[in-house]
Amino acid sequence: MPNEDTAGALPLVVVPGMLCDAGLWRDVEFPDGHDVHHVPLRRAALGALADDVLATVAGPFVLVGLSLGAIVGFEVLRRAPRRVAGLCVMAANAGAPRPEQYAAWREMDELIAAGRFTDVVERTLPDMFPDRCPTPGGARRYRAMAHAVGATAARAQLAAQATRTDAVGVLRTARCPTVVLAGARDTLCPPAFHRAIADAVPGAVLTLLPDAGHLLPWQRPEAVTAALRGLVAAAVRTTPASTADTTP
C-alpha cells in the first residue's frame, strides 16, 4: 500500500536566500520519494526568477523558499497559483521594500562593483544568525557559501530585490497547504513579519522556532525536516490529478 508521504510523488522546488546556494539545505532531510530541484538565484528581476522556478518542473509542485527564495515564491503564486501544490515560507517579508532597503541595496551593489564583495559578505553576515551573534563555525560556513555564490550573482540578487512589490494581496488568494517558519531570534525578518504572512494565507500554519535566526535550515534542520514532511503529505492529499498539467 503506498505511503501517504510518497503517493503522488510531488516534486519539491527549493529556492535559497540571497548569497545562499543548495548547501543551505544540506542538513535537511527532504521527504523520501519526491524529487528535489534546487533553483539558483542568478537573474536580476523577480519575475525572471519566478519564470525559472516555473520552468524547473512540469505540473504541480511544492515550493520551498527562504528569504529572497520565499519572495520569489510569492511571485510564482501570483503567476501560476494552480501549479503551487504546497508552500513553505521561511525567514521572509511579504511587504514592499522600504526606502532604507533600496538605499542599502544600492550601496552594496556599488561596493561589489568597486571590487569589495568581501565587504558585502561581512556586512550581511551578522543578520544571518540569532541576535546577530554568529558562532565562529557558522561564520566560516556562511562566508564559504556566499563566496561560492559570487559577486556576479550577488549583484543580480540585489537588483531582483529592488523589483519586489507587496505580496500580501496575492497571499490572501492562496489555497494550497502552507507552512510558515520563523526564527524567534531572527533580527532581519522578525516573527511579526511571519505572523503577517500566516494571517494572509487561509489555513496557514505558523511555527516559531526558539533560539533560531535567519538561516533556519542550518540552525533548526530537524524542525524544517518535520515541517516539510507534514507539508508534502498535506499537498499530496489535496492536489487533484486534474492539476497535473502546467495550466496557471
Image (cartoon, helix red, strand yellow):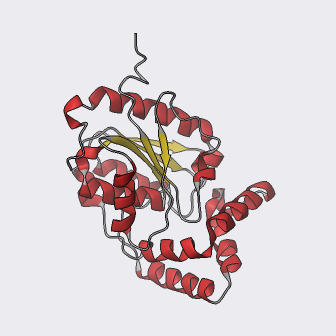
Q: Is residue 204 above or below residue 51?
A: above
Q: How many marks?
A: 0
| Residue 149 appears in view | yes
Query: Picture coordinates of residue 64 (x, y %)?
Result: 44, 47
Query: Picture coordinates of residue 122 (x, y %)?
Result: 70, 73
Q: Is residue 76 left or right of residue 19?
A: left
Q: Residue at x 27, y 32 (%)?
A: 239
Q: Is residue 151 above or below residue 149?
A: below
Q: Is residue 210 left or right of residue 201?
A: right
Query: Picture coordinates of residue 79 (x, y %)?
Result: 25, 57
Q: Nearer the viewer, residue 201 or 241?
A: 241
Q: Is residue 236 above or below residue 161?
A: above
Q: Residue at x 23, y 29 (%)?
A: 241
Query: Picture coordinates of residue 65 (x, y %)?
Result: 46, 52
Q: Residue at x 34, y 29 (%)?
A: 236
Q: Nearer the viewer, residue 219 or 47?
A: 47
Q: Quadrant of the N terminus?
A: top left
Q: Nearer the viewer, residue 131 or 87?
A: 87
Q: Is residue 127 left or right of residue 233?
A: right
